Amino acid sequence: MIDRTVWGLFAALLVVLGAGFIAADWAQFLLVLALAKGMVVLGLLVLMRAGLVSFGQGLWYGLGCYAAGMAGNFLGVTDAFLLLALGIAASTTVAFILGFLLSRYREIFFALLNMAFSMILFGVLVKTSVLGSTDGFNVLTPTFLGYAPSEAALGDTVFLLTAVISFVVAVLIHWYLGSTMGFIGEAIRENELRVEYLGVSARRAVHIKLMIAAALSGIGGVLTAIAVGHVDPEMTYWTTSGEFVFVAILSGTGSVAAPFMGSIIFEVLRTYAYEYSPYTWQMLMGAVMLLVIIFLPGGLWSALSRSRKGEGK
Amino acid sequence: MTPVLEARGLTKTFGAVTAADDIHVAVADGEIVGIIGANGAGKTTFVNMVTGYLKPSAGQILYRGTDITGRDSREITKLGIHRSFQIAQVFPDITVLDNVLVALGVAGDLPRTIFKPLRSPKTEAAADEIIARYGIGEYRNVKAGLLPQGVRKLLDIAMAMVGDPKIILLDEPTSGVSADEKLEAMRGLLKVLKDDKVTVLFVEHDMEIVGEFAQRVIAFYDGRILADGKPDEVLSDSSVREFVIGPELHRRSAGKD
């Protein structure tokens, strides 16, 4: 169970922690956002391994964000771990219900149906004045199992929590994908008929994968809400979902580490592109995507694995 | 004795076309049944109905006396009725070993396998044993999509056999195998199936294979059963020779005789 990937993820955790604690506050914040969104992309990876792309991950992400915000504002819950549990419960419960419909569809129909549901949530949030309509609302400052960090220590605490959760989640998903139940996704992608004639319900397997992806997105949403301190309907908008797909394609699906690596690269790239080219930064991002698709169709991770194979020779 | 598999008045229509018409078949435990018929005679439709791929328009399918009509393919597979396909159904982008590992992995109770690794020395040893039994060991690490058609067929059958079936329906198991290797391939395959005490129904166009290996032959014509009995009786039946075996095979067969 403790294989090279787990050790690699542990080493990556140490590097991220080291970098995060010595980095400037803005860079540490960027890292938190990248890791939180990386978890959403990891959910997409689980789906993509089964041949499914969702243009509606913003739905599950937004549910996590709003669950954290609403639990604080309406129920007075501020404990980060409880917020995470509530975020996971909200996104997974909705995924369980919608999954009965979504798991029947494949390819573009699956992608767009997910988007349709995310846009329904967006529409509801925009029209709900008690949730701040288009402005959203602020999220209460979190506590951590009774520990209420000072304003100065809050950033470090959220960063530590995000990094450790990212590591734990990545290891769990690595084990899951290496199991028969995880690997069945690739079998579904390749030949659903054979899967059914092995006695496995492909629909049920997709349903479970959807719930896993929703849970991961929910975690990402809660961590983002805690880190940013604010939630708004934009988090469920289709452009947010599109961003997750962008990062997933940029990263590739070769490893559970890829979404986090891709997400960090994406956030850094976007920050600098926006800094130096505020009116044309999207063009730069588009060019990067174009280059990745042409030269690295397996995503940035494929370049890493290719160079590792080269070293092995 | 209750037949292991029974079809009672099985009928399938597609609009105005009747692909299978009032099929009555009872198969005994351990029997090896050859199914013959020209293209479009209803052989594959029959197999598809029995294995849940198609729902019958009328009639009943009984497994050990229990009505299983209309159940989906997954339920029927879980009951122990497995199948292979005319076009081998494998996972083309993964290796032969991984194909068998997936089949082995899902043969258990899937939800319990959430963190049980697909690959382990134990599962790989079990997969290697299966691969060796079907004589495809040399292709162990080859992607299934790159296999010769005959080997792909064997992999398809090997995967279907992993779940310990009681009945297996093989749709043209030797198609894609070269003419001079067909008999040997079928002999090896049936030895494995007999060792596992599986009831076998196989669809086949090669009458030499049918005559050699089937204990009983069912001839389909125009969606109906034209003849059902011992191979020599059915294969020498004049209507079977005229309508099923066809003029070309008839001539070839006559030449050999």
Image (spheres, grey):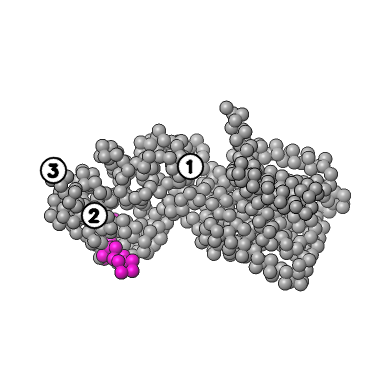
Q: Position of residue B94 (x, y in %)?
A: 48, 42
Instruction: Name the residue tied to disc 2.
Output: B37
Question: Is the C-beta separation of discs 2 and 3 under 8 Å?
Answer: no
Identify the residue shown where x is 34% and y is 41%: B150
State the SS at label 1: loop
Q: Position of residue A96 (x, y in %)?
A: 59, 62
Mark 3 or mark 1: which comes first in sequence? 1
The disc numbered 2 marks a residue on which chain?
B
Number of disc labels: 3
Identify the residue shown where x is 34% and y is 58%: B48
What's the distance in space between the residues labelled 1 and 2, CA to CA? 35 Å
What's the distance in space between the residues labelled 3 and 1, CA to CA? 45 Å
Identify the residue shown where x is 69% and y is 43%: A261
Give the residue type that dot 3 points to.
Gly
Front residue (pair A85, A24): A24
The disc numbered 3 marks a residue on which chain?
B
Q: Which residues are magenta?
A: B1-21
Question: Is the C-beta separation of discs 1 and 2 under 8 Å?
Answer: no
**Above or below, comparing residue A11 to residue B106 in the picture:** above
Give the residue type that dot 1 points to.
Ile
Judge whether residue B11 is colored magenta.
yes
Q: Quadrant of the C terminus of chain B?
A: top left
Residue B94 - label: 1
